Image (cartoon, grey):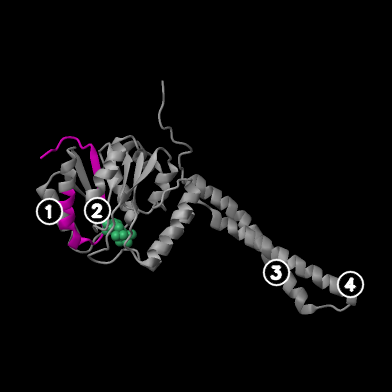
Amino acid sequence: MNTEAPVLSLIIPVYNEEPSLRELYERITTTLEGLGQPYEVITVDDGSRDGSLELLRSFRGQDKRWRVVRLSRNFGQSAAIYAGFSRARGDYILMIDADLQVFPEDIPLLYEKLADGCDMVSGWRVNRHDSLFRKGTSRLLNRYTEHITGFQIHDHGCSLKGFRRPLVEHMLQFSHRCRYLPVDAAMLGGRMEEVPVRHAERRHGASKYGLFKLFRTGFDMVTSVTIMPLQMIGLLGALCALAGFAMGLRVLYIRLLYGNLQQVESVIAAFFFLSGMQLMVTGLMCEYVGRIYIEAQKKPLYIIQEELE
Ligand code: UDP
Ligand code: MG
């Protein structure tokens, strides 16, 4: 068994995946041994309540290249991966899901790209086996990620990804708490490629992303990179105030022309105008709160790829 310093680190977030783990262990071991590079597998137990942790421990007992990081509770997939990143020692750091929906056998495709000089490589589930709803929402999130990061790849959400070590070190320096890894990674820049990978239906258990969690993840993603939702408040206020103002003009026009005072209409106009103004002021405050939020994240302003001395 090869226990030299690892060249390759594979991170696996695990949350209640007991039925898949034995097969995962075997398929990963066969694949990674085939690569002929020293490796380590860092499994991160994200607060599992089934027998996952015991199984992971037993893998460690069998093979010292398998390591177990156990989180104190369920923190979510992204947090688990970051915890794995913080422990990885390899030059190439890859990640894969534990549920065997993506194939461990495709890892060498990603490894080749990294060894070839890519900074980041992402799998692209060409033939994805998930519900129509999932595929639809992913499509939206993909377009959005593309829009804010400027990286045009098909499948930002694919959990089979690989990075060169410096990229991971940069990501570990981010201090914002709401994290959506595909966006963080894509924002770093560098040479990024994608490779088509296989995808299968989940054989055991159910996806950990129910409707609420999907919504939450999408919301986190939008709010972690932009303050656009806060800015919308001001815009809404401006529209309301404008509508109120227009109604006020109409009341005034009727009063001057026909001399009759329209009581209800005046009240409605004043209501729109005042609530609009209030929302605008709130929006202005949100601008400042948003800036504090962005500053507090302490994201690096730029990433230096290489220096020639
Ligand atoms: N996962 C995790 N913590 C969570 C949710 C998921 O560590 O809170 C792990 C899960 O065990 C799996 C991977 O993240 O290895 C992807 O989860 P899942 O298959 O449910 O996501 P989907 O394939 O539906 O996107
Ligand atoms: Mg899955």
Residue 151, horizontal then vertical, whole percent: 45, 45
- Left or right, 192 with respect to 24, comes to right
Q: Is 26 a magenta residue?
A: yes
Asked if disc 3 and disc 1 are in contact, CB closer than 8 Å, the reply is no
What is the x, y in percent for residue 149? 47, 46
Q: Measure how far apart labels 3 and 1 are at the Cα level.
A: 66 Å
Residue at 25 percent across and 38 percent down: it is 90
Q: First in sequence, mark 3 or 1: give its number.
A: 1
User: SS class of the residue under badge 1?
Assistant: helix
Kindly identify the amino acid type of the residue bearing the numbered disc 2: Phe
Question: Does ligand 1 reach within 8 Å of label 1's beta carbon?
Answer: no
Disc 1 or 2, which lies upstream in sequence?
1
Residue sitting at 12 percent across and 46 percent down? Answer: 63
Residue 256 got which mark? 4
Of discs 1 and 2, which sits in the foreground? Answer: 2
Near mark 1 (Cα within 10 A), the count class, few <14, some 14-19 or many ≥20, is: few
Q: Which residue range is magenta in the image?
A: 1-29
Q: Amino acid at mark 1?
A: Ser
Question: Can you name the residue that lies furthest to the top here?
Answer: 309
For label 2, the crowd category at 10 Å Cα-Cα, with few meaning under 14, some 14 to 19 and many 20 or more, is some
Q: Quadrant of residue 255?
A: bottom right
Q: CA distance from mark 1 to mark 4?
A: 87 Å
Q: Label 3: how many residues lie within 10 Å, few (<14), some (14-19) or many (20+)?
A: many
Please state which amino acid type lies under the numbered disc 3: Phe
Give residue 118's quadrant in the image. top left
In the rendered image, which residue does mark 3 sit on? 272
Say which residue label 2 marks.
103
Asked whether the viewer can see residue 175, the reply is: no
- Return the x and y of residue 287 as percentages of the image width and height: 59, 52
**Lower position in the chain sequence, tag 3 or tag 2:** 2
Whole-angstrom CA distance, mark 1 to mark 2, is 22 Å
